Amino acid sequence: MYSLAGKKALIVGIANENSIAYGCARAFREMGADLAVTYLNEKAKRFVAPVAEELDAEILMPLDVTDDLQMATVFREIGDRWGQLDICLHSIAFCPKEDLHGRVVDCSRAGFLAAMDISVHSFLRMAKLAEPMMPEGGTCMTVSYYGAEKVVDNYGVMGPVKAALESATRYLAAELGRKGISVHALSPGPMPTRAASGIADFQTMMDRAEHEAPTGKLASLMDVGAYAAFLASTEAANVTGGVHYIDGGVHVRG
């Protein structure tokens, strides 16, 4: 059985216990990893802090990824406390509601830039800061969705944004692979997370996915977490650059 004992993991994107990042963090912890957890702001802290305590996180810090100083501070604290980082999970995305709910062709410049900065470029910045802290190798992961590959009703501009994220994953994998750093995009099907609640008619999307899934059910947070934990293990060190579907097989449907 694989283990993450002794590994240090940074988790960015927990909003509450229903977050995909929570499922991953819980699996990492159960496999023996030590955790650093971030929260967006003081308003979010009251939801994240109890989760971090449940997971016995050693580090809990604020992180707004649009703030370069906060980003640097988080990684500096990890370096000072642990001297290394083995797992870096990026599970955040954002688009202004007025752009998310409109047509892609109508997306504003400001909305598109904000979505790309927070959803994609922040992953690049995190990987850059993680790289020198992974001298013996490590794993960087992000979270995508099938709407990056095919048009999904109501997913809107996040489809092109997630497509960019998946492309960035491949380029990072190519650039960091010789250093033993693997890079992955996890692609769960629709899940009832706080972030997903901003998508119009999301319940319809979930119902359709459950009906079409070859397994007959949607993936759970722990399904995603178990897969992420394996990818972070030594046994998966030679796997990199992929988009990993954890969606009950929905993506195979035409």
Image (cartoon, rainbow, N blue to C red):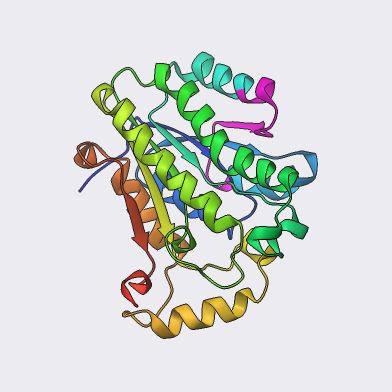
- The residue that appears at 51% across and 36% down in the rendered structure is 123
Left or right: 232, with 60 as reference point: left
Observer able to see residue 36? no
Residue nearer the viewer, 51 or 225:
225
Q: Position of residue 88 (x, y in %)?
A: 45, 35
Is residue 12 highlighted in magenta? no
- The residue that appears at 58% across and 56% down in the rendered structure is 158
Q: Which residues are magenta?
A: 54-71
Q: Position of residue 156 (x, y in %)?
A: 61, 63
Left or right: 245, with 203 as reference point: left
Residue nearer the viewer, 137 or 31:
137
Rendered-image quadrant of the C terminus: bottom left
Q: Is residue 103 above or below residue 140?
A: below
Left or right: 100, with 8 as reference point: right
Q: Is residue 143 above or below residue 169?
A: below
Q: Is residue 98 above or below residue 31?
A: below
